[in-house]
Amino acid sequence: SSDLHVDDGYTMRAWGGDGNGPLAAVIDAAQAARADILLLAGDVFEHNRLQADILDRTHALLTTAPMPVVMLPGNHDPLTPDSVWYRGGLGDIDGAHVLGIAGDTVGFDAYDIEIWGRAHPDYGDIDPLQGAPARRASRHVVAAHGHFVEERPAGDAARAAWLLTPDDIDATGADYVALGHWNVPTDVGTDNVPAHYSGSPDYAATINLVRFKDKDAVSIETAPVKGPPAA
């Protein structure tokens, strides 16, 4: 999943006072789908100014999550020194992994899988897929938070930030590229590498469920997510 936008404003109001509502719902959906690992591809938080009470609730949800949770800081919640990630102590939780704090890669020996992602370090532009390492495990998953385009515009042209292209996706050599930044679920994979935007759970009402069946088979399905309570 991606783009949960945990906050103390719009999301909190939509969820009846619980700014962590989308995170709780996604964890529940992943558990119901019997997911082994939950990957959140950026913008878990709306911004880096959230207060301690919100982050304490996040900490509690991650601490009690029934599966490992891997999180990628995005453009809304970059990994700055004063970010929610550090202030909330989210990288210190057993079973929670913030890409960029203890390295860009996390491995799970029980599944022979590695997940790599380039965290947004600040609010500037980056190439989200730059630096993806070569495969070291049987399963190689890449997470990125950015804007897909078919080709990069000329260097002097007005353009969006955080761009990624089909060539960038292919260059990862990954079994799957999990993307965040778009609210709408979208398949942007190539002939060689599957790549999907999961979409925001509050908008899409789903998470992506990725299953590795055998050496070369990957299936991508959706699983339902509980939405905000009716007004």
Image (cartoon, rainbow, N blue to C red):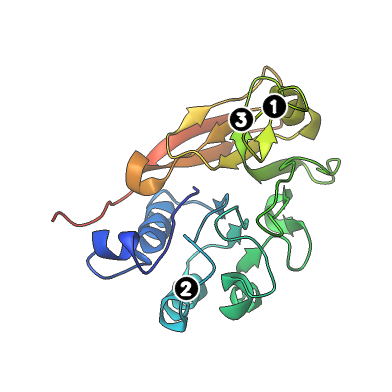
Q: Residues within 10 Å of mark 2 (few under 14, many from 20)?
A: some
Quadrant that contains the C terminus: bottom left
Judging from the image, what secondary structure is the residue with disc 2 in?
loop
Q: Residue 86, image x and y in percent?
A: 64, 76
**Position in image of residue 60 (x %, y %):** 45, 78
State the residue position of label 1: 165
Q: Within 10 angstroms of label 3, few (less than 14), some, or many (20 or more) residues?
A: many
Q: Note whether residue 138 is visible.
A: yes
Q: Earlier in the sequence, mark 3 or mark 1?
A: 3
Labelled pair 3, 1 in contact (Cβ < 8 Å): yes
In this picture, residue 152 sits left or right of residue 69: right
Who's the residue at 58% across and 63% down the image?
A: 68
Foreground: 153 or 52? 153
Quote the CA–CA distance across marks 3 and 1. 6 Å
Q: Is residue 86 above or below residue 223?
A: below
Location of residue 144 with respect to 66 vertically, above or below: above
**Position of residue 152 measured from the top left corner of the image (x, y, whole percent):** 72, 24
Residue type at tag 3 = Phe
Task: Name the residue at 64% across, 31% down.
Answer: 159
- Image quadrant in which you'd find residue 155: top right
From the viewer's perspective, is 2 left or right of 146? left
Question: Residue 50 got which mark?
Answer: 2
Q: Amino acid at mark 2?
A: Leu
Count the marks: 3
